[in-house]
Image (cartoon, rainbow, N blue to C red):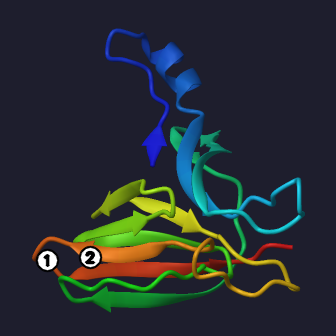
Amino acid sequence: MTFKMATDSDDTNNRTEHLNTITLPVLHSPINEKDNKTDRSLFTDQLLSLDDYNGLFITPRIDALNFRHRMSEPNYVSDWHVAGDATLIIIRSGVLRIGLRNGDHRDFNAGDMFVAKDHLQDDEEFDSEKHGHTAAVIGNEVLTAVHIKLFES
């Protein structure tokens, strides 16, 4: 997650004008236009606007359904899977690596967050050669995270 901020050389008024967005990584499943089927999972960035409430910069309300606490031991590695429901994942400790089918990966450290919302269409079955992502705990530290299931209409 990144914040768009002004540099130290900017004046106070200009700095306030630049605290207006947060960039949040989102793992999703695009639909292939040729066959209308779910394609490989990939990351894109979502810009969230921030409103200024007297110096407190905050996004509009984002509805959530529930949350869970997660803990995984070092060397945990998942099989290929999709998130299914859109879930905001906030890393509290450790390092979580999300692996993609194209060989790319992203590492998320304590304080990082991202949305996992790769999924299949209702009429599709999971293809173990095409769909999903992996999750692995990197390093010797236990991973702790909060998973917040987002409400999406």
**Which of the 4 image quarters holds residue 35?**
bottom right
For badge 2, the amino acid type reads Val
Decide if residue 82 is in sight here.
Answer: yes
Dots 1 and 2: beta carbons under 8 Å? yes
Q: Residue at x 41, y 66 (%)?
A: 98
Left or right side of 42 for 35: right
Secondary element at image label 2: strand
Q: Nearer the viewer, residue 138 or 20?
A: 138
Q: Residue at x 45, y 49 (%)?
A: 1
Residue 88, image x, y percentages: 55, 70
Q: Which residue is mark 1?
A: 141
For badge 1, the amino acid type reads Glu
Left or right side of 67 for 113: left
**Which of the 4 image quarters holds residue 50?**
top right
Residues under labels 1 and 2: Cα distance? 8 Å
Secondary element at image label 1: loop
Residue 19, image x, y percentages: 53, 31
> Up-down: is 150 above or below 8?
below
